[in-house]
Image (tube, rainbow, N blue to C red):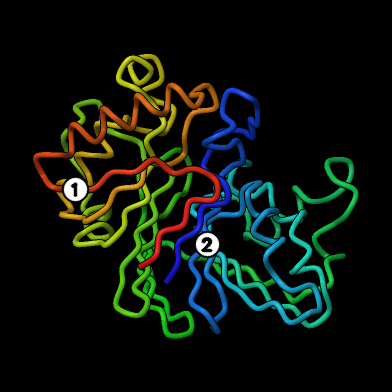
Amino acid sequence: MEVTFYGVRGSCPCPSEANRRYGGNTACVALTIEGRPPIVFDLGTGLRAFGETQPLDGSFKGTALVTHIHWDHIQGLPFFPAADRQGARFDIYGPEQEEATLTELINGLMRPPYFPVTYGELRGDIQFHEVLKDELHIGDATVIVRPVPHIGPTVGYRVDWDGKIVTYISDHQAPLGMESIADSVIELVQGADVLIHDAQYTDAEFEQKSHWGHCTVEYAVHVAREGHVKKLVLFHHDPSHGDDCMDLILQDAQRMAEPSGIEVVAAFEGLKLDL
C-alpha cells in the first residue's frame, strides 16, 4: 500500500514561494494498492492533483472518506474530472449533519452563484453515504469510523488494508488541559502503522486560538504516544507556516517523540509512504 499526500494544509489554499517545499493545497491523501480502487481521505484542493493520476475514460472507481464538510475539505470535488465521466463511480462517506443530508448540502454549495456547474450535472455516479460511528467494508479494506472533537460533526478513520493500518484525524480539538484524549480517538489510533494527525498550531498560537477546533504539535505527539503508533505524520499545516517554520516544527516534534521511539515526519505535497 502507498500513502500519497496531495494536499497538506488546513483552513485555505495558500501556495506561495514561502511554502514551495511543503505545498499549499488543502487536505487530500490517497491510499492505493495496485489493481484495486483507491481510497481517498478528504476532498480538499489537493484532489485536483490526485485526479491527474486517474483515468478519464469513465473507468474510474474509488472511495472518499471525508472527515467533515468545512470548505478546506470539500473544495476539490468540482475539479475532479475522473468522476465527471459516464461510467465512473465515486462513493463519498462523511459525517451525518443536523441541517440536511450530505447530498442536499453539497447541492447547496455547488451551484450558481457560487459555482457555475451544479452537482447534478456531473456525469459520473457520485453517491454520498452518511456515517458517524460505523464499521465499513470497502473492497477488502476494513474501515472504522468514530467521532472526533472539532467544531461541527467530524469523524476520523482507521483503515486496515492488507494488514497495514492507517489512521486519519485531520482536525482535532485539543482540550485546554492538553492531557485527556477522547476514547473514540484512542480507538482509532491504537497500534496504527501510520497516524496522520492535525498539528496546526504552536503552543503560542493555541493560546490565542484554543477554541478554533485544532491542536498543537505537542498534542499530536501525545496522541501518537498514547496510541503506541509507529509513525506520526504532522498534517493540516497552518497557512502561515512557511517552509522554514515547518522545518523547526518538525524538529521539535521529533525531539518530543524520540523517547517513545515514534518516527515523526511532516506531510508535504508529493510525500509517498510505502507500507
Q: Locate the N terminus and report the quarter of the image it occupies.
A: bottom left
In the image, 187 versus 198, the foreground residue is 198
Q: Where is residue 235, by image quadrant?
A: top left
Q: Position of residue 87 (x, y in %)?
A: 78, 83
Residue visible at 22% across and 44% down in the picture:
223
From the viewer's perspective, is residue 181 above or below residue 184? Answer: above
Residue visible at 70% across and 58% down in the picture:
104
Q: Position of residue 146 (x, y in %)?
A: 35, 60
In the image, 260 versus 75, the foreground residue is 260
What amino acid is labelled 1 in the image? Ile
In the image, 14 versus 143, the foreground residue is 14
In the drawing, what numbered circle is on residue 262? 1
- Residues at discs 2 and 1 in contact (Cβ within 8 Å): no
Residue visible at 62% across and 68% down in the picture:
128
From the viewer's perspective, is residue 179 above or below residue 201? Answer: below
> Helix, strand or loop at disc 1?
loop
Q: Which residue is mark 2?
A: 30
Q: Position of residue 252 (x, y in %)?
A: 26, 27
From the viewer's perspective, is residue 215 above or below residue 56? Answer: above
86 displayed left or right of 103: right
What amino acid is labelled 2 in the image? Ala
Q: Where is residue 20, by image quadrant?
A: top right
56 displayed left or right of 179: right
Q: Position of residue 248 (x, y in %)?
A: 35, 24
Residue visible at 59% across and 67% down in the picture:
92
Q: Locate the C terminus and report the quarter of the image it occupies.
A: bottom left
